[in-house]
């Protein structure tokens, strides 16, 4: 029922069809093409009072900002404070919150404290970003380790965290025994042992954990990390809880420590000890 000489006939019938198409979910363009209505003014009249379907509404990038501005205004924030927080113009803020009541006048001291807190929060965010960047850059500098680098790293790690032989002891303890609670440290230690030709069949594992912890979950965690069945672990060592100590490792993620023994490792222990003192002498000669 389109136009002739620029005029439309049977307007009410055309409107009835347009409204039906609109309510069926068609867009303006689809209705225009379906009814051959090329005049936007006529199309506006045909669709007057009919809201567009949801799928035709374009998302407004400022919707979230507008909503946040209104939240802050209801909390008593000033235009200046909202502008600093959201990074938008005060004219936009005024438009968005003009229907909201003005906040009560704040004490200048309270305003100063709020501004100082916002500056400090910004400073903390900057520091966190710098911290993350420094760590990421340092990690990227390392790259893949050579066999020699891995050997030296393992020697230093063992001498810092592993058990040592005591020359004064009547019974020599020349064997590798290592304990740690950090999964990354355990993984590095295992890589080091593997590079030295020590297979899992020579290793013995045991969990050491406080008796108040979830022992079964801890054993399963360490077993998965080292790649063996938890049933092959030696009996877990339970440490008594001392209520007089302010222990922090009581959260759900607490997994205790993993102890790793290496059977028939006296020769390897002597090599580690010798390499350690070689590192010390090498550092002395470098200075």
Image (tube, helix red, strand yellow):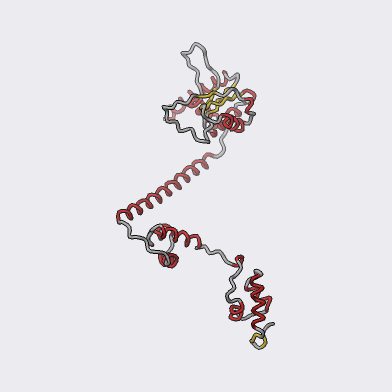
- The extreme top residue here reads 170
Q: Quadrant of residue 219?
A: top right
- The answer to which of 95 and 244 lies nearer the viewer is 244
Which residue is at a point 60% across and 23% down the rendered structure image?
234
Residue furthest bottom in the image? 5
Q: State the image quarter where residue 190 is shown.
A: top right
Of 228 and 177, the residue lying toward us: 228
Horizontal and vertical percent for residue 90?
A: 40, 65
- Above or below, 137 relative to 14: above
Residue at horizontal 54 percent and vertical 17 percent from the top: 174
Q: Is residue 72 left or right of residue 236?
A: left
- The spot of residue 139 in percent (x, y) is 51, 41
Q: Residue at x 61, y 28 (%)?
A: 194
In this rendering, would 257 be left or right of 75?
Answer: right
Image side of residue 239 versus residue 27, left or right: left
Q: Where, quadrant-wise, is the N terminus in this rendering?
A: bottom right
Residue 263 x/y as whole percent? 60, 20
Does residue 112 lie above or below 226 as drawn? below
């Amino acid at each position: 029922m389109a136009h002739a000489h620029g005029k439309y006939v049977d307007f009410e019938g055309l409107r009835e069809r347009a409204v039906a198409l609109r309510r069926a979910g068609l867009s303006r363009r689809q209705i225009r093409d379906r009814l051959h209505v090329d005049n936007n003014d006529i199309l506006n009249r045909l669709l007057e009072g009919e809201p567009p379907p949801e799928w035709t509404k374009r998302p407004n990038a400022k919707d979230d900002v507008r909503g946040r501005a209104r939240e802050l205004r209801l909390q008593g924030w000033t235009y200046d404070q909202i502008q600093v927080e959201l990074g938008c113009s005060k004219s936009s803020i005024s438009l968005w919150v003009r229907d909201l009541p003005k906040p009560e006048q704040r004490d200048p001291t309270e305003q100063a404290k709020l501004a100082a807190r916002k500056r400090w929060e910004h400073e903390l965010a900057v520091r966190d970003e710098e911290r993350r960047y420094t760590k990421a850059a340092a990690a990227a500098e390392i790259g893949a380790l050579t066999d020699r680098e891995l050997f030296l790293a393992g020697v230093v790690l063992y001498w810092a965290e592993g058990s040592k032989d005591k020359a004064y002891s009547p019974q020599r303890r020349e064997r590798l025994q290592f304990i740690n609670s950090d999964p990354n440290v355990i993984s590095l230690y295992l890589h080091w042992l593997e590079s030295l030709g020590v297979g899992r069949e020579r290793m013995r594992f045991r969990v050491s954990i406080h008796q108040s912890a979830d022992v079964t979950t801890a054993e399963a965690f360490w077993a998965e990390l080292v790649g063996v069945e938890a049933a092959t672990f030696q009996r877990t060592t339970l440490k008594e809880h001392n209520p007089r100590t302010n222990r922090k490792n009581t959260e759900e993620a607490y997994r205790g420590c993993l102890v790793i023994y290496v059977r028939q490792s006296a020769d390897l222990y002597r090599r580690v000890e010798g390499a350690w003192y070689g590192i010390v002498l090498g550092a002395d000669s470098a200075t």
